[in-house]
Image (cartoon, rainbow, N blue to C red):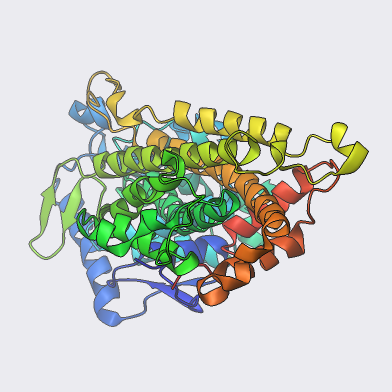
Amino acid sequence: MSLTKSAAPAFVTFGPTALTIEDVNHIASGTAQAALSDAPDFLARIQRGADFLDRLLREDGTVYGVTTGYGDSCTVTVPPDLIAELPHHLYTYHGCGLGELFSPEQTRAILATRLTSLSKGYSGVSVGLLQQIAALLQHDLLPLIPEEGSVGASGDLTPLSYLAAVLCGERKVWKNGEQIDAAAALQAAGLTPLRLRPKEGLAIMNGTAVMTALACLAYRRAEYLCQLATRITAMASFTLDGNAHHFDATLFSVKPHPGQQQVAAWLRTDLHCDQPLRNDKRLQDRYSIRCAPHVIGVLTDALPWLRSSIENELNSANDNPIIDPDNERVLHGGHFYGGHIAFAMDSMKNAVANIADLLDRQMALMVDSRYNNGLPSNLSGATGPRAAINHGLKALQISASAWTAEALKLTMPASVFSRSTECHNQDKVSMGTIAARDCLRVLELTEQVVAALLVTVRQGVWLRSERQPEIGLTDLPDGRLAAMQAALSADLPPVAEDRMLEPELRLLLRRIRARHWDLYD
């Protein structure tokens, strides 16, 4: 497995073509612009769904959420003269979100994900609605969406109500980092607030866009984490003067998990795994080094099926009811249920937190003079009389342990906490959005552990090279570790005297999230 490396396209086109996780990330980061397909067949298909619904209404057809109330209120018939008001009531009474606001990056991903689903042509929406969502992305007018309030079925109703309201010129948006009224923002961009057609409020809100968008962002971070944790492991092994034979190709051929084998192969490109073992080396390193491919490999092996689940959901029509314009049918179902994303995110956060735990254990070995094979306590670089007052990475190890503990605490699966809601109509729900938010928090904490470990291995490799120049980095395969050490050294001077490390940790976090280092092919 290697990272999906593709240059950001100038545009991501929303239409009949399936999108990828990378497409959503390009939109989210602002490295690609959104464009709605102008293909005649695509536009005609969208219009057919809207026309079919119009005809049903003229013929007094009964359509859930169009001529009836919502949820448990599906038995309530809406008078014909009030049907046009119904979608506006839907987003209005769902305006009850709380918690922090989704970031601009997350909000772009949410808009892109909802637009992808609606562009499948099974939602009965107008071309104008798709154009308005695309315009929000093009003008970077981003609804202020609270993070909390979704149970993940009947979709992400409450958070997506903030998108529906902004399309109609209500509530607030981010614009150039400021919060401004949506009506003023639309007017400044030359956009006219929508008056939603009968099913459009439901089509916008009754889907899995929030959880799926967050899953796309989480996947990209987890993918890089696999490689970065592997490189840290190689540097930790060097710091500890470890036994690289633990990553032997024949050894891993007999337990053929592909991701686990890939991690071991990456380690072989960093370390000497084919040279005779020195007599003074420990025969078996402790588990956090020896079993690193087995721990990192769990996430690495999970990535293909995680991608499959996330991209299937991304490219699905997941509202209710589904409008079949070809056969002129209205299909009532439950595609808003976010079970696949919930399971993917619960699984991902477990595998990610285990990597945090692995790295925390590696750090504990490196800073402890009982286990680090001759390096100073806490990897302090101070010498002479000043060594007595310097404490090196002592506090950093405590912080890394705290971040790890918090990550591990969040691994309780959210998907098992289904709650019966909405008068027992939504009596089994996915909790997919909570699972996705938990996963992003676990990734954030694990990246903080990674930042601490980058400081640690930079310091440890420096100290080992000073004490044992005969096993220098330049003798290792392809000069990979030497190049990584040089890159880290450009940001991090050795800790020869105690100093505040927070600014450097924050710099490293920015580097991690920008995929600053090219690691493995």
| Quarter of the rendering occupied by the C terminus | bottom left
Q: Which of 148 and 80 is in front in this view?
A: 148
Q: Nearer the viewer, residue 284 or 344?
A: 284
Which residue is drawn at the image coordinates 52% and 72% (left, top)? 32
Which residue is drawn at the image coordinates 79% and 46% (left, top)? 381
* Residue 357 horizontal/vertical position (percent): 48, 36
- Residue 310 in sight: no
Which residue is drawn at the image coordinates 39% and 49% (left, top)? 296
* Residue 147 horizontal/vertical position (percent): 51, 36
Residue 54 sits in quarter: bottom left
- Residue 100 in sight: yes
* Residue 195 horizontal/vertical position (percent): 44, 52
Q: Which of 475 and 439 is in front in this view?
A: 475
Residue 466 sits in quarter: bottom right
Q: Work out whether 67 lies above or below 326.
A: above
* Residue 336 horizontal/vertical position (percent): 26, 42
Which residue is drawn at the image coordinates 26% and 47% (left, top)? 319
